[in-house]
Amino acid sequence: MRQPIVNICLFFFVLQVICIVASLLYPNDFRYVSQTNIGLLLRAIPVLGIISLGVGVLMITGEYDLSVGSVYTLAGYSIALLFGMGLPVWLAVFATLAIAAAIGVTNGLITVKFAIPSFIATMGAMLVVRGVVRWLSEGRTVSFKPDETFSDLLTGSFYGIEAPFIWFIALALLTGLLVHKSKLGNHFYLVGGHEKTAIAVGINSHRVKVIAFALASLAAAIAGILSITRVGTATPAQGIGLELKAIAVCVIGGLFLSGGRGTVLGIVVGACLMYMVEDVLLLLRAPGFYLDVFVGAILVVAVILNTWLTRKAGK
Amino acid sequence: MTIPSSTPLLALKGISKQYGHVQALSGVDFQINRNEIVGLLGDNGAGKSTLVRIMSGVEFPDSGQVFRDGQPATIKSRKDSEKLGIETIYQDSALVGSASIMRNFFAGRELTKGLGLLDTHKMNAIVMDILVNMVRISGINSPDILVEALSGGQRQAVAIARAVYFKTAMLLLDEPTSALSVRETAKLLEHLAELKREGVSAVFITHNLYHAYESCDRFTILSRGQVIGSLAKAETSVRELNDLIVKY
């Protein structure tokens, strides 16, 4: 059943065509097809996009992670502070990813072992990790200035394409391989689709879910590292609300909160769509609150459409 | 070592299971012989489902022994029961609706090309071959159809096809007809007969005595956690079975 994904791709395509045509017709008023705008989009999409990949994988198993926004910020602080202490940058990256994975595994174990909703378990983690960030930072921003080899690799450009976007696409392909082509990926879908059945055929659903939680946390940390490398600084309050935005991206992309459905392509298109809408509204000089109204409306309409199509296909 | 054909495939002796204050099973003896369909009968709460869960490794008995081909065995997990050749089809949860036929067929037993990557091509070919040539389900032309788009009978057929392919020795069917139409039920009973010809034994758990009587060779009747009778088809009738269940 590929209906929701076909829909979202079609919508994305039509929107692209309209924007490109409009921008060619009114090149001075609507600078959609300009190097600056395209560069901006390619730099903006990856952070939310990468977080959404992790959140999406977890959502396929039927769970959520509200702590990704906090983990994202913690990762920025972690790499900056460790690097500042004199650790080689790659070691700082490794340590940061290890910390994130540990948070993810903890979220997962708490959720499955105590059989509580992940919504609550990760809401707790969201607050705890955010608190740790405030404690570490003492409310101050932190700066991160690694050597050029490192920053070029993460944030430079390659044949004119922004490196973060290349990272995003590479991670998306890797996620696609995992989710759609691997045995573990099949278990993600089966556990999310009907956990009891998955257990009955001998799948260790707890293990599968804990892995998915770890991946969600890891993705958030990768996004955090990319972000601080690009911007050079992190603030304690950044990344608030990213967890909900990531869930919105996944849902727009055709994933179901109940799990067991969705594609990685959907997540990628969902992330692109989210920023395109934001970008178009900015280019049209619409006041900021329009953005929330639009994203909110798209979110609800997307879910209604996806649910309706799935129900129809199931009959 | 050859095993005499009279040795039961699976024998359970003195199985007891308690949930809190409720004695779900007390000292139950149960056996599945070669090439036979056993009807496990009893009213609601008689302990049928508990016995099935014990045989499939989802629950562990408080006491009792299990023998496979006369040899002592333990069933502590789904993996153990799978090794003994036991496959369970639960009434509502044999398959995942949001996943495709192929992905359900190989759920937990996926074929890979190494590195954990699925051999989709091979699995698709096997599924179509089994569905078309062995179980003969009508209306299925692609292994990518989602299970939720299938009728109840088609779903049961897919689950049965899976059991056939994975060379299951004993198939436990927990209330398989409860959600089926009359026509689908007839089809399922046909599949059961076919399975028997393939050399698969089955346990048919139901409280529909007519379905059981039609397809089973032997009946074990449970009441309040105890076996109150074990009768061959030739020596009983639907009326007698009904009386047995109601009387206790």
Image (tube, helix red, strand yellow):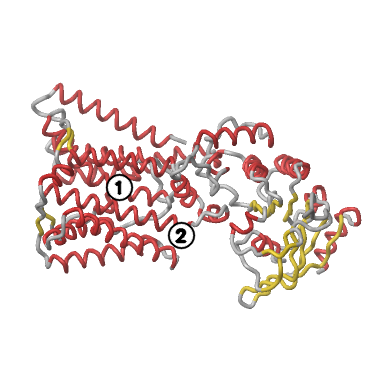
Point out the residue furthest to the top here: A25
Q: Answer whether residue B240 is visible to the viewer in this image.
A: yes
Task: Give how far across and how far down residue B106 sits, in percent.
Answer: 56, 44
Is A10 on the left-hand or right-hand side of B72? left
**Secondary structure of residue under mark 2:** helix
Q: Is residue B200 left or right of residue A94?
A: right
Using the image, tell me which numbered label, if any, was put on residue A265: none
Q: Is residue A304 visible?
A: no
Residue on which disc 2 sits: A206
Name the subunit of mark 1. A
The residue to which callout 1 is attached is A52
Q: Secondary structure at mark 1?
A: helix
Q: Residue at x 67, y 53 (%)?
A: B85
The chain under label 2 reads: A
Q: Position of residue B120 (x, y in %)?
A: 50, 36
Q: What residue occupies the far bottom of the structure in this picture?
A: B21
Q: Residue at x 87, y 56 (%)?
A: B232
Q: Are marks 2 and 1 on the same chain?
A: yes
3D distance between C-alphas at marks 2 and 1: 22 Å
Coordinates of residue A254 in the picture (x, y in percent): 38, 41
**Amino acid identity at mark 1:** Ser
Task: Locate residue B136: give its quadrant.
Answer: top right
> In the rendered view, would you say B139 is above or below B19?
above
Q: Foreground: B96 or A229?
A: A229
Mark positioned earlier in the residue sequence (2 or 1): 1
Disc 2 packing (10 Å; few <14; some 14–19; many ≥20) = some
Answer few, some or many: residues within 10 Å of disc 1's Cα (few below 14, many 20 plus, some between 14 and 19): many
Disc 2 marks a residue whose amino acid type is His
Front one among B122 and A254 = B122
